[in-house]
Image (cartoon, rainbow, N blue to C red):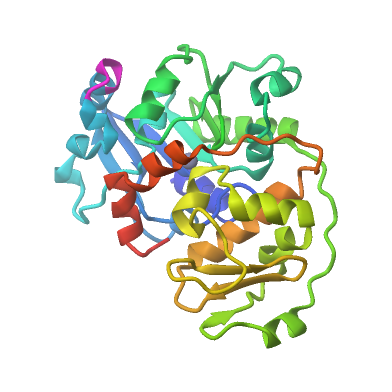
Amino acid sequence: MALRAVSAQLGSDPLLVQAAGGNTSIKLEGVMWIKASGTWLRDAAEKEIFVPLDLKSLTEALRDGNPDCESCTAFVRQDLNPQGLRPSIETSVHGLMSQKVVLHVHCVNTIAWMILKGAQEKVVPLMTGLNWAFVPYARPGLQLSRAIRAVILPETNVLLLQNHGLAVAGGTVAEAAQLLREVVGRLRRNVQSLPPVNLPALRQSAPEGFHAPANVNAHGFALLPWATFLACYNVYYPDHAVFLGTQMPSGPQPGSPVVVLPGQGVFIRNDARPAVESMLGCLTDVFSRLSPSDELKALTPEEIALLLNWDAEKYRQSLKLG
Ligand SMILES: [Zn+2]
């Protein structure tokens, strides 16, 4: 129950979780309960969002690098899963941390650090005294589980995931939540103020079939000239590619859910998934924590292709819940 409350709290904070991103888990009596694919953490208090996995077979498979760890569906305790939920695409992160409770978030402060070139060295002074490990970028699934296994120790309870986010673990929900606050506090970055968006003017120039979102945060990155260019032509973390595509055009284009007018704001296709607005807000929250002099590491075209052609990711997109 405590995990449901904390999950709903994390899921309601856009600085920690956007849309269906992030996930939480608890290991209880041989079963690991983890957020199901496509569900939203913020719904944790009202809906069943957790799916049960057999902990022993999951742990053994992760240890052996078994290909079933790609989706982890083979480990679902179907007898305890009447709704037929499927495990999060990031289940391996939770299975590889030995502690009882794991919280994984797409914290924008962490992301702002983790997309910098030389991120690992840059955070060392901030993480003194913590049992943390830096995990080089890897596609969620089997590749990410390999990358974590290469760096994790039994006592590691903080993972900083390059071009991705943060995972913390603890013996209780309260302990994990406290550690999350501690790490986020250490990684907090200065926020630069953004020029105001002129929503009424923007609304008048919306292309047919598009609208200017009411949430001003969705527009912010488009008001920073240096950030607009980087955000429109690069992908810095997986959910960006999944929900916003690999490029954001300045006019309507088939397949793109957004139009970005540099210096003015953004338009969202009227039939776009709710996650699109959340992911635009995430760009603003990340880029307002960076400066033009920061050197960034984007995902490579190969990394993006691997991400978008992945079956489990296709499944998540097909749910249309994002
Ligand atoms: Zn993640």
Asked whether residue 13 is in view, the answer is no
- Residue at screen point 25% across, 16% down: 64
Q: Name the chief secondary structure element in magenta.
A: helix
Q: Is residue 195 above or below residue 152?
A: below
**Location of residue 218 with respect to 210 vertically, above or below:** above
In percent of width and height, residue 241 lies at: 48, 51
- Span shown in magenta: 62-66
Q: Residue at x 52, y 63 (%)?
A: 276
Q: Quadrant of residue 60?
A: top left
Total marks in image = 0
Q: Residue furthest left?
A: 79
- The residue lying at 64 percent from left, 77 percent from top is 212
Residue nearest the viewer, comparing 56 with 219 = 219
> Quadrant location of the C terminus?
bottom left
The x, y position of residue 192, in whole percent, is 84, 50
| Residue occupying the point 76% across, 43% down | 290
Above or below, 39 relative to 173: below
On whether residue 27 falls in the magenta region, the answer is no
Q: Left or right of 229: which side holds 157? A: left
Looking at the picture, tell me which residue is in the foreground, 251 or 119: 251
Q: Is residue 276 visible?
A: yes
Residue 293 x/y as whole percent = 81, 38
Q: Is residue 250 left or right of residue 217?
A: left
Q: Position of residue 308 (x, y in %)?
A: 38, 48
